[in-house]
Image (spheres, rainbow, N blue to C red):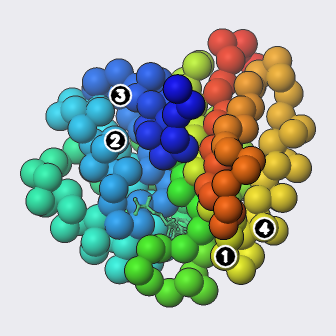
Amino acid sequence: MLKRVLPYAHELMQQAIKPGETVIDATCGNGNDTVFLSEVTGPTGKVYAFDIQEQAINNTKQKLMDAKVTNVQLIHDGHQHVEQYIATEEQGKVAAAIFNLGYLPGSDKQVITIPENTITAIDKLTKVLKPSGIIVCVVYYGHDGGQTEKNALLEHLHHYDQKYFQVLQYGFINQKNNPPFILAIQKTNRLNA
Ligand SMILES: C[S@@+](CC[C@H](N)C(=O)[O-])C[C@H]1O[C@@H](n2cnc3c(N)ncnc32)[C@H](O)[C@@H]1O
């Protein structure tokens, strides 16, 4: 059976993460992925969760309290500054990161992820990933500005050297209303990436 996009995004993350590892939710929004990552990494693991909107941070905080999980550090800042928050000893060991691009569901549709920041964050994350670590981007592009971000991201990732990264695009091409698709970047085991 063909897997739907959102469950497949989680499956890719889950395959890359072992309990106790460090992971990143680059766009925590309403906290759905943050809770998922918290459960996958477990009490000995660590989740860094970023968002630029206070409402998103508060919504995620509430969801984490409801789920009674404590291994998440919420960061009210842009993911483009990710390297400032990852402890030195965790650099090169991050197992996975996830982005959900677009706007916060149920909120201001003018506040969206923008290509420069997304691309900066992805480039920085490739430096802190462990070998075989993965970055999963769920690309929503039906909103104003979404197509621009989608095109910029595809163009940028086409140039990632295949010696060091495998880049996958996964999505359905005959569905209506611009359904989201996945861009997944997996670091190979070569040392120089
Ligand atoms: C599609 S929503 C995320 C949905 C979320 N994963 C969930 O489960 O609800 C995108 C989020 O990215 C956030 N965002 C936009 N630019 C950002 C940036 N530079 N750094 C971190 N978050 C950003 C928005 O505020 C918004 O909450």
**Marks 3 and 4, how far apart in space?**
34 Å
**Marks 1 and 4, how far apart in space?**
8 Å
Q: Nearer the viewer, mark 3 or mark 2?
A: 2
Left or right? Give the position of 136 relative to 151.
Answer: left
The reply to whether residue 82 is in sight is no
Residues tagged 3 and 2 counted as in contact (Cβ below 8 A): no
Q: Name the image quarter holding residue 44.
A: top left
> Which residue is at the front of the view, 110 or 180?
180
**Marks 3 and 2, how far apart in space?**
10 Å
Q: Disc 1 marks which amino acid?
A: His
Residue 6, how many percent across, how many down? Answer: 48, 46
Residue 191, how many percent across, how many down? Answer: 70, 15
**Marks 1 and 2, how far apart in space?**
26 Å
Residues tagged 1 and 4 counted as in contact (Cβ below 8 A): no
Q: Which residue is mark 1?
A: 143
Residue at image position (38%, 34%) is 22
Q: Earlier in the sequence, mark 4 or mark 2?
A: 2
> Which residue is at the front of the view, 173 or 160?
173
Q: Nearer the viewer, mark 1 or mark 2?
A: 1
Q: Which residue is mark 3?
A: 21
Q: Earlier in the sequence, mark 1 or mark 2?
A: 2
Q: Earlier in the sequence, mark 3 or mark 2?
A: 3
Residue 120, how many percent across, how many down? Answer: 71, 55
